[in-house]
Image (cartoon, rainbow, N blue to C red):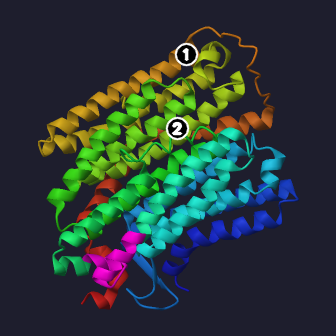
Amino acid sequence: MNSASLVLTLPVVIPLATAILTLALREHRAAQRTASVTGWTGLLGVAIWLLIEVQDAGAIAVQLGGWPAPYGITFVADRLSALMVLVSAAMGLAVGLYSLAGLSPEREHHGHHTLFHVLLMGVNGSFLTGDLFNLYVWFEVMLIASFVLVTLGGRRGQLEGGLKYMTLNLLGSMIFLASVGFLYSQTGTLNMAHLHVVLDESGGGTLLLTISVLLLIAFGIKAAVFPLFMWLPTSYHTPPTAVSAIFAGLLTKVGVYALIRAFTLIFTFDVGWTHSLLLWLAGLTMASGVLGAMVQGSVRRILSFHIVSQIGYMVMGLALYTLAGLAGAVFYIIHHIVVKTNLFLIGGLIARVCGSAELSRVGGLIRKRPLLAGLFLIPGLSLAGIPPLSGFWAKFAVIKASLEVDAWVIAAVALAVGLWTLFSMMKIWSEAFWKPDPEDERCVPVPMDLASRVLGYGPVIALALVTIAIGLYPAWLADHAAASAVQLLEPDDYLRAVLGEALR
């Protein structure tokens, strides 16, 4: 097995092997935790290796089983997918360590660690697969693991949220599978690189345009795009904090990634129509998400609606379909994964310290926990786009890209949503941190020993430092995002890696 084969398969093999090992060790809590930490750390190391390989060699691919593309199972990585694997591995490690501070022995015994690693396997498989059918398979791996993680514990709120989560995501899977069947009947292939070649030669058509809209709906459900997002804010606040945090950071971004792949590599024969539709959806997603956040009274509900509004910025960059727009979308995805994951982890710390996440029941944290107050401000202000944090550069990139093509309306919407986001973050600040503690007797704080404090605060501090570092030194990520955008707009490198001699 050559290095390309190894580095492309290990991001899936490591979580799978760790999932099996943690299942076998579920009667031994300490050993199970050690196996999990080893798996998260090993995955991060492999992700760094993958990114270095792609930066040095360009896009790389492996044909599993030795069957040549487009007939076999292809794993492929370019700059975008390698970067996504890296950030998902980093979030897996951060959230995984955080979870060790608050997981009950019962939840660990009933499969939390195993399901967590299966979820990471599905996420990485989605980023690395080279054909649409296997993308569907990896989506289902994620869906199964995430549904059980949402409902594990069996509390009424979890079951209700899990049912809504499962119902709409199953609908998305059905539409996705039907679209895959229709597309195969029209083209005879599902390999994404080969689809690019076939559709470029055929010139598209009305039926293929209809299929593209069906896939837009399927991926739009996964990404929580307007008007398909209501499953998210009704379910993400119900499971334990660590589960909500990894969902908030990664799952909708897999949907955004699928949209980017589909509408830069496959469906580019009528950009004027498809990407105009995406631009409308981006604006409506931004506005509806932030308006929903402004009327909520719970930390995690506010943050859940803000996932939706921020997805709009990423889709906006895709819809502009320019080098600057796509680079802005990639930058925004990475920024948002880090910031949103951290905000959910901080929301969990607020609930532990105060005994509740309801804003009406908490307060006084700036005096009781000044470190937590400072840690909240960093991702909170970054989410709103305040300089010099990462969110400023992310918003600046997509808004500047829109102004370059005279898309004044979407630029105005993006600016307004940024102001409303700041309002929502200041709402959390004023209620949870600034106002006096209401001392609600129904709120019972969760005691934290030294180990729990280290595991709880350590990942939050690390992610806050990443946010500051991106804000102060954005050049590396901006350059990588720009190089990713070049590969998306000019996919010759991707096509050569996957198709090789068949491309001729």
Q: Main secondary structure of the magenta part?
A: helix
The segment highlighted magenta reads: 178-196
Q: Tell me if residue 228 comes above or below residue 188 in the rendering.
A: above
462 on left or right of 133: right
Q: Please say whether residue 242 is one of the residues in the magenta stretch.
A: no
Which structural element holds mark 2?
helix
Closer to the camera, 431 or 78?
A: 431
Closer to the camera, 386 or 147?
A: 147
Q: Position of residue 158 (x, y in %)?
A: 66, 43
Tell me, yes or no, if residue 393 can be seen here: no
Separation of disc 1 and disc 2 at Cα?
A: 25 Å
253 on left or right of 111: left
Name the residue tied to disc 2. Answer: 465
Tell me, yes or no, if residue 154 can be seen here: yes
* First along the sequence among labels 1 and 2: 1
**Label 2 crowd bin: few (<14), some (14–19), many (20+), radius 10 Å:** some
102 on left or right of 254: right
| Residue placed furthest toward the left | 406
Q: Position of residue 403 (x, y in %)?
A: 16, 40
Q: Please say whether residue 189 is one of the residues in the magenta stretch.
A: yes
Which structural element holds mark 1?
helix
Name the residue tied to disc 1. Answer: 431
Choose mark 1 or mark 2, whichever is in front: 1
- What amino acid is labelled 1 in the image? Glu
Q: Please give the name of the residue rendered at 74% of the width and 69% of the height, measured from the top-left corner.
A: 20
Q: Tell me if residue 114 comes above or below residue 70 in the rendering.
A: above
Q: In which quadrant will I find the C terminus? A: bottom left
Corner quadrant of residue 222: bottom left
- What amino acid is labelled 2 in the image? Leu
